[in-house]
Image (tube, rainbow, N blue to C red):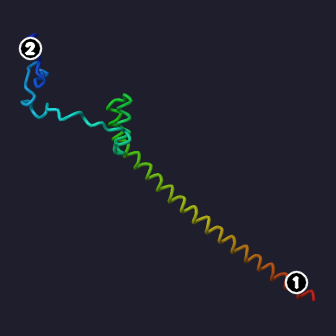
Amino acid sequence: MEPTPNLPVRADIVQLRDGTHIYTDQLPTAFQQQGPPPVVHIHQAPPDRTGQRVALGTGIGAGTVAAGVYFGPLLVGVLTSMAISLAVVALVAVATAWGLVTVVRTVAQDGDQAAKNLRKARRRRGR
C-alpha cells in the first residue's frame, strides 16, 4: 500500500523489506536503529583482528581470512618451536666451543711449562 501523493510521508513510518509499512515505535528490536554504527579504525582494532580487517578491506575473500585465522597461530607455534630448537643447538655449540678452548689452553699451558722445564734442565747440564 503506497501513500497517496497528496499526503506527506510521516518520518516515523518505515517500509520493511517485504513492502509493508510500519510505525517506527512498533518495530521489533532487531530493526530498531540506535544510531549510526560505530566506526572502528584499523589502528584501534585489537591486534589479533587487524590483519583480518586489512584483508577484508582490500577485497580478499572470507576464505583467505579464515585460513589466516587458522594457520596464523599454527605458524606462530612452528616458528616458536624452531626458535627454541635453534636456541638449544646454539647453547650446545657455545658449551662445546668453551670446553674445547679451555682444553686447548690447558694443554698449551702445560706444553709451555714442559718447554720451560726442558730449558732449565739443559742449562743445568750445560754448566
Q: In this view, does 102 lie to the left or right of 110?
A: left
Q: What residue type is labelled 2?
A: Leu
Question: In the rendered image of this protein, does residue 32 appear above or below residue 84?
Answer: above
Looking at the figure, which quarter contains the C terminus?
bottom right
Q: Distance between the residues labelled 2 and 1?
A: 130 Å
Return the residue at label 1: 122
Question: Which class describes the residues within 10 Å of circle 2: few (<14), some (14-19), or many (20+)?
Answer: few
Instruction: Give residue 20's position: percent from left, percent from top.
Output: 8, 20
Q: Quadrant of residue 92?
A: bottom right
According to the image, label 2 marks what residue?
A: 7
Q: Which residue lies furthest to the top in this view?
A: 5
Is residue 50 depicted above or below 61 in this figure?
below
Instruction: Name the quarter where the N terminus is drawn.
Output: top left
Mark toward the start of the polypeptide (2 vs 1): 2
Q: Nearer the viewer, residue 96 or 80?
A: 80
Tag 1's secondary structure?
helix
Residue at position x 35%, y 44% in the image? 48
In the rendered image, residue 44, in percent from the top left (x then y), is placed at 35, 43
57 to 88, vertically: above or below: above
Specify the farthest residue to the right: 127
Closer to the camera, 82 or 119? Answer: 82
Q: Which residue is drawn at 36% across and 28% down?
A: 59
